[in-house]
Amino acid sequence: MNIGILGAGQLGQMLALAGYPLGNRFTFLDTTGGHSAAIGDIISDPQHQRLAEFLERVDVVTYEFEHLPVALIREIEAHRPVYPSSRAIAVCQNRVEEKALFDRLAIPTPEYRVVESAEALEHAARALGCPVVAKSTTEGYDGKGQAVLKAPEDAQSAWAAIGHSQLVVEAFVDFVREVSIIAVRGRDGEVRFYPMAENQHVDGILRYSVAPLPDLDDAVQHTADGYIRALLDELDYVGVLALELFQTRDGRLLANEMAPRVHNSGHWTQNGAVTGQFENHLRAVQGLPLGDTAARGVTCMANVIGREPASAEVLGQPGAHLHRYGKAERAGRKLGHINVVAPDHAALQTRLDAVAALLPGAPAPAFSFVS
Amino acid sequence: MNIGILGAGQLGQMLALAGYPLGNRFTFLDTTGGHSAAIGDIISDPQHQRLAEFLERVDVVTYEFEHLPVALIREIEAHRPVYPSSRAIAVCQNRVEEKALFDRLAIPTPEYRVVESAEALEHAARALGCPVVAKSTTEGYDGKGQAVLKAPEDAQSAWAAIGHSQLVVEAFVDFVREVSIIAVRGRDGEVRFYPMAENQHVDGILRYSVAPLPDLDDAVQHTADGYIRALLDELDYVGVLALELFQTRDGRLLANEMAPRVHNSGHWTQNGAVTGQFENHLRAVQGLPLGDTAARGVTCMANVIGREPASAEVLGQPGAHLHRYGKAERAGRKLGHINVVAPDHAALQTRLDAVAALLPGAPAPAFSFVS
């Protein structure tokens, strides 16, 4: 089966690496004209003129990036199956629709308001109680299109800085940690859940994900499983879905946002689960049985951002698995990741400390499992 | 680092899949003009005219197939590092040199004679005691260039059938099972050993490999480690080396033959070891630290030969990992393999029985660990 992928970055590359052993071939449609890390046939199409050529070559279409025009996905759907569907994309690229869906499915979220002026933003900040986070309804990812208001008086400058006509304003959550749940749903509706991960962000960019979590109650995992299953079933979703959540001091989960694709917080599954998220996404979109999502040992994924350590230093660390994307170094850019695998969390912490020391500017990770 | 690979079959493809995450890129020199499964830049060179172009593109050279002209490897060595070296290739493609090396390093082998005529073959068969196996000194692999003599009188027809000017004649070994040891040696001389595998052949082609073995004494593994280390050090070898052995009823190991490359009996390591043989070979040839060779669970590799089962059926089996090579079906052709992973040998046997039932013409495996 020839699989078409919209986008040609590292997620596309990792999908291809997982798919060749299944007998798949890949064609990438790259509309950015920028860097391409993909392995396979790349159709570079910055002028949006080569869609027909792309469609002719592929049996099914998926994507590595959800900030795509919904109209484009609908056009493709008229000719080829697209998974996840345009409906999933439409919801995920609009924070208001996303929140409405969470509300409808009784998935708790931080308290929020939707505002369409600086005055309304100020009012919302006052009502929710500062600090609050304001986020553009559309086009926001990796911390872009966001501002923190420490006081209602920050509303004018925040409104101007974000520069969108509609924002979602969220109350700050007194969370213990950020977690995520990743699940995959097949064409036949079968769902499998990965063990939840704890995520650490710096400057809005993911730095570390660890899974499974030693101190996570089974009930919490089951709650998260229920939330993501509700989303998957409601959207008649096919493929991997990621849901980011806050875990509060009293143990509750509040949904932050979701991503309709393979996700950075699931990269640990490449070396730490029986079947990785990339393979399971491909199994789902082509209607194959899903693979076992159980963990193998415990794993921490560390993103390589901005500057790459020497491969020899990384690979000399016990349990370290290197995943480079073949990109040029640039401040704030995701260049690769390292999956550190260990038999237990004590060993993982030791191995992780050694790997973290090789990552320029990466603070030593302090996960909640560390006493 | 751009890695040049001589050959463009499935071993080259699996090397590439293991190497992209390390940041490697691949250029394949395909002198066969036949099927190419490789992922990367392929230089098709059936006329042997494009070697300079190949060398210009690559930093280091390795190969997926040892039946290459030694003169070609020496020519490449004058321009780029080649691992394993031409000396390793020269020994491995000549059974007489290989046996002499085993003898020199005190690695036991089945009793043998070298013959250069049908009369000498008959004499050797009589001296060793029939049955014996006659093998061409050069150009033999996957059961080609071989004949079994049930009686000395078969010498004339066997000599004619093999059609070589020099043969090695081996006494039959009363072995309990065929095993192999795979090890990897770095540029700095560091050596790591994988757990030994038990191998089952049908018609001279490998069908199943299982590792680790529940009933293998540590002392036997250490003996095999010692044999392969002696070979690696003697040849100042860099990369993965495979050594096939017979295990006799009284527990001894007798060396059968070796292969200077990643090996079919090591494919289980892709899903069943911390670091797979393909990644470790690449780490070795580019001077990177070697990865952990420990097993994760227990694994059986089943070759897919001649005809492919439906992917959906394979992937529906617990613990099954599919590796297709993208080749057209043909009797006797290796089209892919399935790694079946389980937490223990009892579970592995159950899973394996289910997978074996999907493989056309594959007898149900009966490993020595099965009671």
Image (cartoon, coloured by chain):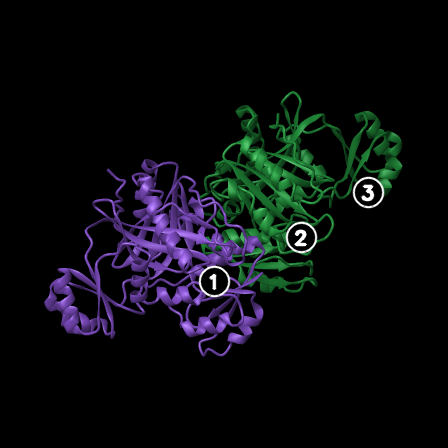
Chain colours: A green, B purple
Residue carrying label 2? A71
Specify the label residue B83 is tagged with. Answer: 1
Q: Give how far across and how far down residue A249 sits, in percent.
A: 67, 22
Q: Residue placed at 63% from the left, 24% from the top?
A: A252
Q: Is residue A81 left or right of residue B233?
A: right
Residue A193 vs residue A226, the one in the foreground? A193
Residue A151 vs residue B177, the one in the foreground? B177
Task: Assign a secondary structure to mark 3.
Answer: helix
Q: Give how far across and how far down residue A327 sits, in percent.
A: 66, 56
Q: Is residue A251 left or right of residue B309?
A: right
Task: Assign a secondary structure to mark 2.
Answer: helix
Task: Assign a secondary structure to mark 1.
Answer: loop
Q: Give how far across and how far down residue A88 sits, in percent.
A: 62, 43
* Alpha-carbon span between mark 3 and mark 2: 25 Å
Judge whether B66 appears above or below A363 on screen. below
* Alpha-carbon span between mark 2 and mark 1: 52 Å
Residue carrying label 3? A162
Q: Quadrant of the C terminus of chain B?
A: top left
